[in-house]
Amino acid sequence: MTSTAEATSFVAAPSTPVLECRGIDVAYGPVQVLFDVDLTVHPGEIVALLGTNGAGKSTLLKAISGLVRPKSGTVTFDGEEITGEAAHLTAARGLVQMPGGKGVFPTLSVKDNLRLSCWLFRDDAERVDAKVAEVLDLFPRLKDRYSNLAGDMSGGEQQMLTLGMALVNEPKLLMIDELSLGLAPTIVGDLIEVVHDINRMGVTIIVVEQSINVALTLARRAVFMEKGEFRFTGPTSALLERPDILRSVFIAGSSVDDADGGDVPAAAAATPTEAPREAPGPDAPAVLRCAGVVKRFGGINAIDGIDLHLREGEVLGLIGQNGAGKTTLFDCISGYHRVDGGRIELHGTDVTAWEPHERALYQLGRSFQEAMLYPTLTVRETIATALERHLDNRDIVAAALAAPASYDSEIQAWRRVEELIEMMNLGAFRDKLVGELSTGSRRIVELACLLAQEPSVLLLDEPS
């Protein structure tokens, strides 16, 4: 692979666009998400699709690939109109989408994930073997993890696998949703090189990004979306001359007070109104302590002899590359992994052998790399569910009979839900299904749920 310091792309001689979207409108029920969107992509291009959370970027990809049917407008791929065509048919044409987040089957091995992705030509064993081999050559790290469960790999390795699963289908147009989300800079750099290599093979690429730096490195042309419409289309270098757009995606050094954040909850764009708390002194009581914590997976030490001391009121940053063991340590602290050595104390009590729910009742809160929420509940219902442990009356019979004690308890809970919705500026999303929210908005809902639990120790796994 060849390192690149600036965006490059393989652009073929002028020809029929590989993709044309005209007048695309998309709605989820009564809520319209995309408004009269036009997009043209030429063979060999890398186009960066930028925008704030909830701007409609992922919805546009879904409309193109057939996962969502446009309310109006047309999608033309390789000279043929494919508007509303089923997703498996668009994939067979060579229009392939790499989903945002973790797009792997966590309980299957790397080998099985890759072979399962070859379903379009599943009856051609020789071709399946050849395509899997090509992916392993492109990602040597996957070759080393070939028999490992995908769910046991780091976020960066899972992203490599997701990209490999898309590549086995020989895309003409590859649409990548959130390439760099939650990944260490070194991993992002490796993935950028791979994307350039793929483009040099003649594959046209659309990549959804929130990082201007990544977009500048990847693409020569960018499109910026806000509230379901295009606000900018042009060279990525011209973005540096648009401070309004840079503020919208929170470039370092910009003032978010002036940013129009689209449908991002204001909590995500708020500036602190109080001075930071002073760091606790050395005599402050410890609320969390790890002593010599060891966790092995087979013969591999994932974490080895970790000592950690967290004082009351302290904010501690845990930094490391993908696969360094950060999430594994959190899993050990919160009880999802049994440690193979060492001791974990919470508020001075040894909780090493406690179950996760027991630690939660002892005021330990935990977020995950992916917001662990109920996609079919509304934001209001999701936050109310997180309040369950604080209900004054949890008797099922009393609730069924609408007994006064149960009724009063529910009223108090809903009041607290409204307080949290107001605190996190989620009013616009109160009655939306969580599964319909953007990644950033789901993060805000997850934080509201954590606050509902009133933890005294909070573990945040890659909240940004």
Image: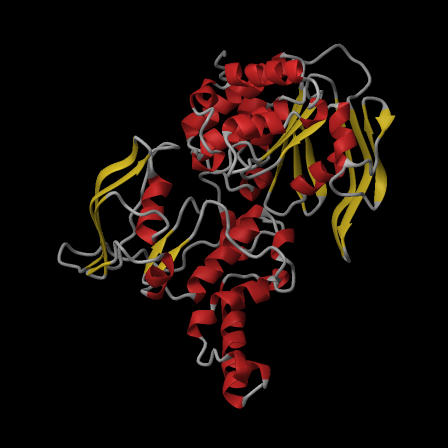
* Residue at position x 51%, y 14% in the image: 137
Question: At which x and y percent is residue 285?
Answer: 18, 60
User: Is 369 placed above or below 283 here?
Assistant: above
Question: At which x and y percent is residue 301?
Answer: 28, 33
Q: Is residue 425 visible?
A: yes
User: Is 378 placed above or below 34 here?
Assistant: below
Q: Is residue 39 visible?
A: no
Which of 440/106 is in front? 106
* Residue at position x 30%, y 58% in the image: 354
Q: How many marks?
A: 0
Which of 162/219 is in front? 162
- Viewed as shown, does residue 383 lie left or right of 298? right
Colour logic: secondary structure
Which of 1/353 is in front? 353
Most extreme residue toward the bottom is 404
* Residue at position x 57%, y 23% in the image: 218
Q: Quadrant of residue 326?
A: top left
User: Is 331 placed above or below 20 here?
Assistant: below
* Residue at position x 57%, y 57% in the image: 374
- Viewed as shown, does residue 422 lie left or right of 230? left
Question: At which x and y percent is residue 342?
Answer: 20, 46
Question: At which x and y percent is residue 417?
Answer: 52, 70
User: Is 71 placed above or below 415 here?
Assistant: above
Q: Quadrant of residue 102?
A: top right
